[in-house]
Image (cartoon, rainbow, N blue to C red):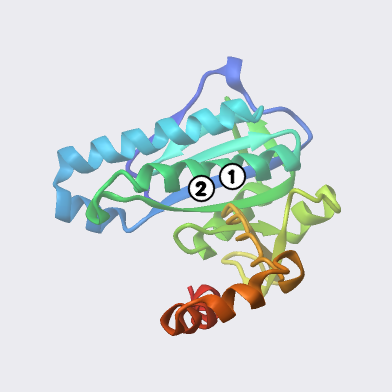
Amino acid sequence: MHNLVNTTYPMAQQPPEGVVTVLFTDIVGSAALKTSQGDAVAQEIVRGHFELLREQVESHGGREVKTLGDGLMATFVSPRSALTSAIAMQRALADGNRAKPPEQQVQVRVGLNAGEAIREDGDIFGSTVDAAARICAKAAGGQILASETVRGIVGAVKELQFRDRGRFRLKGFPERWRLLEVAWERRRPQSSPLPSSRSAPHTSAARKNAPSSAVSWSRRSPATARSS
């Protein structure tokens, strides 16, 4: 995480007390973005990405705590809301990237953890927060990683899919942490199945009366459709 800017939000937007789910984001390759696009253009891109993230935090009942360079920190009362917010973030960024040239596209990593936190002057502190930041650092661009604690609290939810990525060492923590990747990409609609021979009873008769070239093409069609 970069430490260029540390903006803490006022007391009216303080995170709740008790157990919270902490979410961190970070842009991957921000230095390269500034080098290739220049500071002014890069800053505009970063500002636009923050707007997208904030929309998803707010619409899912979260609270922005602060920004850290080109990363954002937010808290949620519900871990499920935090996860759906992270998914919405990645989808919104992916949609925005489609309209941009490759050199201006933004890849963001997201990390989540849940637990008790210390509240002070509109900010939160403690090992729960530190672990969330470390988990974020383990993620790749376009990836969401969550702790096993988050997964355990959420339980079995049909809309959320987790992939076990194994155990990782997090800086400052003696034990290894099991991290899970959260799936966020939309599933592509399945193509319609080819009509069966039963649904076309006149196919054989039609082939007998068709030119040889047409029969040859019709025999190739299913194979071509399967390979496409």
In the image, farthest residue toward the top: 12
Please state the horizontal and vertical placement of residue 116, each as a whole percent of the image. Answer: 76, 42
Q: Is residue 137 above or below residue 91?
A: below
Mark sitting on residue 6:
none
Left or right, 197 with reference to 129? right
Badge 2 crowding class, 10 Å Cα cut-off, few under 14, some 14 to 19, many 20 or more, is many
Q: Are marks 1 and 2 in contact (CB under 8 Å)?
A: yes
Mark sitting on residue 90:
2
Seen from the viewer's position, the closer of residues 140 and 147 is 140
Seen from the viewer's position, the closer of residues 223 and 110 is 223
Left or right, 142 with reference to 176? left
Question: At 82% across and 49% down in the image, what residue appears?
Answer: 157
Whole-angstrom CA distance, mark 1 to mark 2, is: 6 Å
Badge 1 crowding class, 10 Å Cα cut-off, few under 14, some 14 to 19, many 20 or more, is many
Left or right, 75 with reference to 107? right
Please state the horizontal and vertical placement of residue 214, each as a whole percent of the image. Answer: 45, 77
Q: Is residue 8 above or below residue 137?
A: above
Question: At 32% across and 34% down in the image, what residue appears?
Answer: 47
Please state the horizontal and vertical placement of residue 75, each as a whole percent of the image. Answer: 64, 36
Q: Is residue 205 above or below residue 159?
A: below
Residue type, label 1:
Ala
Q: Secondary structure at mark 2?
A: helix
Q: Is residue 55 visible?
A: yes
Q: Is residue 222 visible?
A: no
Question: At 60% across and 60% down in the image, what residue appears?
Answer: 191
Seen from the viewer's position, the closer of residues 215 and 181 is 215
In the image, farthest residue toward the front: 209
Q: Secondary structure at mark 1?
A: helix
Residue type, label 2:
Gln
Please state the horizontal and vertical placement of residue 78, each as a whole percent of the image. Answer: 76, 36
Left or right, 226 with reference to 6? right
Mark sitting on residue 86:
1
